[in-house]
């Protein structure tokens, strides 16, 4: 047996699981088909960012890595402004209404991943191997054997797929998914607006999809513009001046004139949910188990809660001298996370469908709903607490009172 847990995928979710297990002395191996980026030019920007909830911050604090992330650069957001382009409906969230300093943080993905991987390096219980391409899996009664492209085999009591939406682990184990393409592309880039973003996350719902301005340090903003594929392609191809003009108009010039501060890219949007998260000696976490529309920025946070929950189940089983890779052990993880993830998937899909159309009666209803929710303080506060990760069946690592190392 090479290790207790073999984790395929060294991204944010896989590395979080490895850190959570290694701190408990559970021997892990992390493999990835691509070597992670650990250093970068000081003036560069990662166009991939995540809106990190307070529950996810608690996970990072519990693992002792949050301070290192803040040293590399995180940006708190204290307010959110959401409004409909086809009416007067709007809603405003303010951290002060919950007696909080912030609602969450916008963090570059590379900051999260590199901090976690560097935190793994001094831990005796975890080993990393990349690039290492997985090509075959054999699940046996007592172990799972993974074969790599170079012919190396690795055996573990439990194999965890944390290898993204196109998961090789999921495919090799014949786990099916259901879902659909949204026929949208998310265009992402970084800009510098004329006016201060005021540590506010802004989102305008347009007929073709939402446009989000997410605050970054140095008064930059990360842009996530979900739109039709042809429009996204056009936005990628037009010159910088025309692009910034279109962006200003789509955003109603809420922050004045806009200067492009990074490259543009796009990726397709789809909903995908695995029909099962587990099997004997196998578990899926993060995007390998579920991908959702990015309109509320919840995707990575669901994955981090998956990692924290699976780590808790594994640690508890080990303390009770139970088989960590047994189906009966892993069933607790699946019951814990699949229902919560399904609710979030359904909610995000519903929001997308409600706002991405111009049917007159729906426009009236959704504008009325936004304005009414904005006026109902208790209802809005309940929604806010769920969104920032202060309610729900949270793992211990996500609890703000859980001790850190």
Image (cartoon, rainbow, N blue to C red):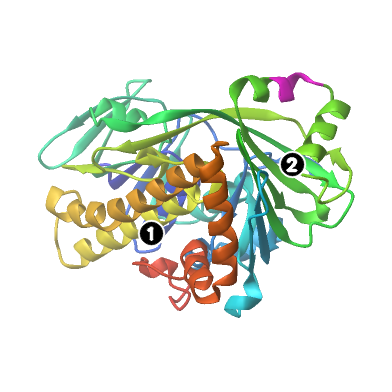
Across and down, in percent, residue 379 comes to 48, 71
Where is 305 relative to 398, above or below? above
- Element type where label 2 sits in the image: loop
Residue at point 81%, 51% (across, down): 254
> In this rendering, would 213 be left or right of 64?
right
In terms of secondary structure, where does tag 1 sit? Answer: helix
Q: Position of residue 212 (x, y in %)?
A: 67, 46
Q: Is residue 235 magenta?
A: yes
Residue 260 sits inside the magenta stretch: no
Q: CA distance from mark 2 to mark 1?
A: 28 Å
Determine whether 143 is above or below 63 in the image. above
Q: Which residues are magenta?
A: 234-238
Q: In the rendered image, which quarter contains the N terminus?
A: top left
Residue 229 in picture, x, y percent from top left: 60, 22
Q: Is residue 153 visible?
A: no
Residue 45, labelled with which disc? 2
User: Overall secondary structure of the magenta stretch?
Assistant: helix
What residue occupies the far left of the structure in this picture? 141
How busy is the neighbourhood of tag 2: few (under 14 within 10 Å), some, or many (20 plus)?
some
Q: Is residue 50 left or right of residue 177?
A: right
Say whether residue 176 is visible.
yes
Residue located at (71% from left, 20% from top):
234
User: Which class describes the residues within 10 Å of circle 1: few (<14), some (14-19), or many (20+)?
Assistant: many
Mark closest to the chain's N terminus, 2 or 1? 2
In the picture, residue 372 is in which quadrant?
A: bottom right
Report the residue marked by disc 1: 308
- Side (left or right) of 367 relative to 393: right
Q: Nearer the viewer, residue 168 or 361?
A: 361
Measuring 18% from the left and 52% from the top, which residue is drawn there? 331
The answer to whether 268 is drawn above or below residue 399 in the figure is above
The residue lying at 60 percent from left, 45 percent from top is 109
Q: Are marks 2 and 1 in contact (CB under 8 Å)?
A: no
């Amino acid at each position: 047996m090479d290790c207790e847990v073999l984790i395929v995928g060294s991204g944010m979710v896989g590395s979080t699981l490895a850190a959570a297990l290694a701190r408990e002395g559970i021997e892990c191996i992390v493999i990835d088909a691509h070597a992670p980026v650990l250093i970068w030019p000081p003036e560069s920007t990662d166009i991939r960012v995540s809106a990190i909830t307070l529950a996810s911050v608690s996970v990072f604090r519990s693992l002792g890595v949050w301070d290192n992330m803040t040293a590399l650069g995180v940006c708190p957001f204290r307010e959110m402004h959401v409004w409909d382009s086809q009416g007067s409906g709007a809603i405003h969230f303010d951290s002060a209404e919950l007696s909080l300093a912030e609602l969450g943080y916008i963090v570059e993905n590379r900051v999260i991943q590199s901090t976690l991987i560097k935190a793994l390096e001094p831990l005796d219980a975890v080993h990393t191997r990349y690039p290492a391409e997985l090509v075959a899996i054999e699940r046996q009664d007592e172990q799972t054997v993974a074969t790599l492209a170079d012919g190396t085999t690795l055996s573990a009591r439990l194999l965890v797929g944390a290898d993204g939406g196109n998961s090789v682990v999921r495919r090799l184990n014949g786990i099916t998914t259901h879902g659909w393409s949204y026929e949208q592309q998310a265009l992402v880039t970084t800009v510098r607006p004329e006016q201060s973003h005021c540590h506010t996350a802004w989102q305008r719902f347009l007929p073709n999809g939402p446009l989000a301005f997410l605050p970054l340090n140095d008064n930059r903003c990360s842009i996530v513009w979900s739109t039709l594929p042809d429009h996204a392609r056009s936005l990628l191809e037009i010159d910088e001046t025309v692009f910034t003009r279109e962006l200003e108009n789509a955003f109603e010039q809420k922050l004045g004139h806009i200067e492009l501060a990074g490259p543009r890219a796009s990726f397709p949007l789809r909903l995908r949910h695995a029909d099962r998260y587990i099997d004997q000696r196998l578990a899926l976490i993060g995007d390998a188990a579920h991908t959702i529309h990015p309109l509320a920025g919840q995707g990575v946070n669901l994955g981090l809660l998956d990692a924290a929950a699976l780590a808790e189940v594994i640690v508890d089983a080990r303390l009770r001298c139970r088989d960590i890779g047994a189906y009966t052990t892993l069933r607790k993880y699946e019951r814990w996370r699949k229902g919560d993830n399904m609710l979030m998937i359904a909610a995000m899909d519903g929001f997308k469908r409600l706002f991405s159309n111009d049917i007159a009666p729906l426009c009236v209803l959704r504008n009325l709903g936004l304005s009414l929710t904005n006026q109902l303080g208790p209802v809005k506060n309940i929604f806010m607490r769920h969104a920032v990760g202060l309610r729900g069946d949270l793992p211990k690592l996500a609890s703000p009172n859980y001790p850190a190392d």
